Image (cartoon, rainbow, N blue to C red):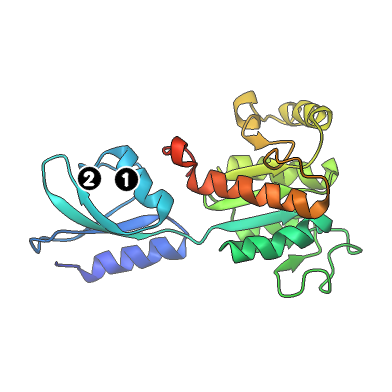
Amino acid sequence: MSVSAELIRELNEARARREPIALVSRPDGGAASLVRPGEDIGLAESALDGFFRSGKSGLADLAGGEQVFLAVHVPAPRLVLIGAVHISQALAPMARIAGLDVTIIDPRTAFATEDRFEGFPLYADWPDEVLPGLGLDPYTALAAVTHDPKIDDMPLMAALEANCFYVGALGSRKTHGKRQIRMEEAGVSEDAFSRIHAPIGLDIGASNPSEIAVSVLAEVILRLRGAKSEKGQGI
């Protein structure tokens, strides 16, 4: 396999920007290349999506019969929690165990305290002050759980704009209906708004903050990996 210094530089720059990318090498020793989601290398789009969804490297058969090896590099999945509430206290450690990098944002200093979220990146600031620096992207999940439109609405719209793989919001269907009116008035399309999971979490009958946290994490993982019967959805 021949890998040029230029190719390695481009690969490293993409990884630094949290862009999914794969190094394509050929068993016959031909020149390597790079491929990103949606690009055509002679591999079925669904198969290429599968590599980027799983983040796993492996052999692939191209349409012309050639076999190549894809060394896949995808950003670490992240979970941004808007709200340092009881649900977040249960959700943050579980999400970390599941392999997600977790960040908590809440401008209410009574909730956003180090003793409640020891060891986690914590911002006691408004989301519009923090999110530009975090750089939301398709490998980020965002869950808004403050139940306060002044805090939740902006990050929800930012997550839709950034095509985050999961966008969820706490609140009843009635609350979500009012949210839709506000966001559509702010310019969010009906199609984009439909990507918000609300009421948040899988319907497992959760009745307390810890159980709600379980339902939210399960829904995040479902959107990240896709159910076995729904391959082709998610990232």
Of labels 2 and 1, the one closer to you: 1
The residue at the point 16 percent across, 39 percent down is: 63
Estimate how packed mark 1 is, as few (under 14), some (14 to 19) or many (20 or more) residues with alpha carbons within 10 Å.
Answer: many
Going from N to C along the chain, the mark reached first, 2 or 1, is 2
Q: Position of residue 127 (x, y in %)?
A: 75, 54
Estimate how packed mark 2 is, as few (under 14), some (14 to 19) or many (20 or more) residues with alpha carbons within 10 Å.
Answer: some
* Front-most of residues 24 and 47: 47
Name of the residue lying farthest toward the front: 205
The residue at the point 77 percent across, 57 percent down is: 88
The residue at the point 62 percent across, 48 percent down is: 218
Q: Amino acid at mark 1?
A: Leu
**Mark 2 = which residue?**
41
Task: Work out whether 132 lies above or below 122.
Answer: above
What kind of element bears circle 2? loop
**Mark 1 = which residue?**
48
Q: Position of residue 184 (x, y in %)?
A: 72, 27
Q: Quadrant of the N terminus?
A: bottom left
Horizontal side, residue 201 vs residue 53: left or right: right
Horizontal side, residue 12 vs residue 226: left or right: left
Q: Position of residue 227 (x, y in %)?
A: 49, 41
Residue 162 quadrant: top right
Q: Position of residue 139 (x, y in %)?
A: 52, 52
Name the disc covering residue 89, or none. none
Q: Amino acid at mark 2?
A: Ile
> Does the image show residue 185?
yes
> Does the image show residue 128?
no
Q: Are marks 2 and 1 in contact (CB under 8 Å)?
A: yes
Task: Work out whether 235 lies above or below 11.
Answer: above
